[in-house]
Image (cartoon, rainbow, N blue to C red):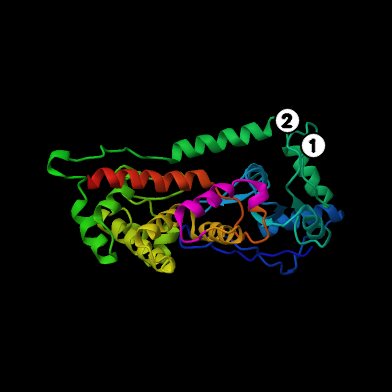
Amino acid sequence: MNRNYLLIPVFLLLASCQQQKSHKPSVIFAKDTDTADVVELDGIQQSGTVIAGTLNGPEYYYEWHGHGMGIQYLLADAFAQSIGARLEMQVAKDSAELKSWLEAGQIDFIAIGDVRKKDSAPWETNIQSLRNAMNAWWTPRRESEVLAQFTHRVKQGTRIHRRPMWRNRGRGEISDYDHIFMRHASRIGWDWKLMAAQCFQESGFDPQARSWAGAQGLMQIMPSTARQLGVPNSKIWNPETNIATAARLLSNLNGKYSDIHDSDERINFVLAAYNGGSGHIDDARTLTRKNGGNADKWNDVRHWILQLQYPNTYRDPDVRCGYMRGTETVEYVSSIRSHWNTYRR
């Protein structure tokens, strides 16, 4: 079976989006057995990786804050764990491409089936022993069980104790970290109260805040982002380091969108990319231009960020990064703007 073990790291915020992986054949050396089907499943388990092909979208697979999401992804990942393998997802442009990958042995199974099936797993594979393992694992309640486990993991993994919006409003003190915001905001040409507003949105000024996805500290920095910026994870909980790292990230994004000459407009795009990833924002700008809008105007681009939640948009051939939770990003920018206005008043 042709298999590809190429892994492409995903860096939250700095990375545009996960690109389609190439398929490189490799060889599995299986044990000597009497049954070829057993050899194939055994080879998957020896390799430690099972490869599933799917489509992009909330019901299938998408990436959010550096993590795989989507109903089919969560189910396929749970199955992979049950056979002692790590799941690798390949995203195709359509079902015909998935069929061709399966026939060529580039994926182990197609994960786009009807999860309402009662008697057998909803996926398609040419490996009989893998199909047997799927059917043994699958139950009519499997989807609800997996989603409940994921919801529990999110709740257990999220730790945020939000502080008041003001430390002392009468004296104009926003938080315990105002002096750090002042120092690092000035270095990137931002209003320190804007950084404070973003921090309130991210963590509620809780220096020990942690999301289920692993984002850490005041500005909710992901470990992968910290590594890419050369910041040791052991230091990311430190308020000074956390805010400094966020400032570097904001500076990088500000440079990326330097073609937007109106600095106030540019702020919206920087905040949106901080939350949703620059690749998705670039997709929305591309769609804005394509449909006659102004890609430098937030009000025009915001419309297409919201449209990236719908199949007819995120499957547009000019969209590189697929489905986006656009409502979350638009509300993120709007909330920070509102907090900032309050602080400035």
Q: Main secondary structure of the magenta part?
A: helix
Near-viewer residue (68 or 166): 166
Near-viewer residue (157 or 257): 257
Near-viewer residue (140 or 56): 56
Q: Residue at x 79, y 63 (%)?
A: 1
Relative to 226, is 149 above or below?
A: above
On the image, the x and y values in percent for residue 259 come to 44, 69
On the image, the x and y values in percent for residue 102 come to 80, 57
Residue at the disc numbered 1: 120
Identify the amino acid type marked 1. Answer: Ser
Near-viewer residue (282 or 57): 282
Q: Residue at x 69, y 58 (%)?
A: 46
The residue segment tinted magenta is 294-313
Residue 134 picture quarter = top right
Residue 186 picture quarter = bottom left
Does residue 110 show up magenta in the picture?
no
Residue at the disc numbered 2: 140
Identify the amino acid type marked 2. Answer: Pro
Label 2: element kind: loop
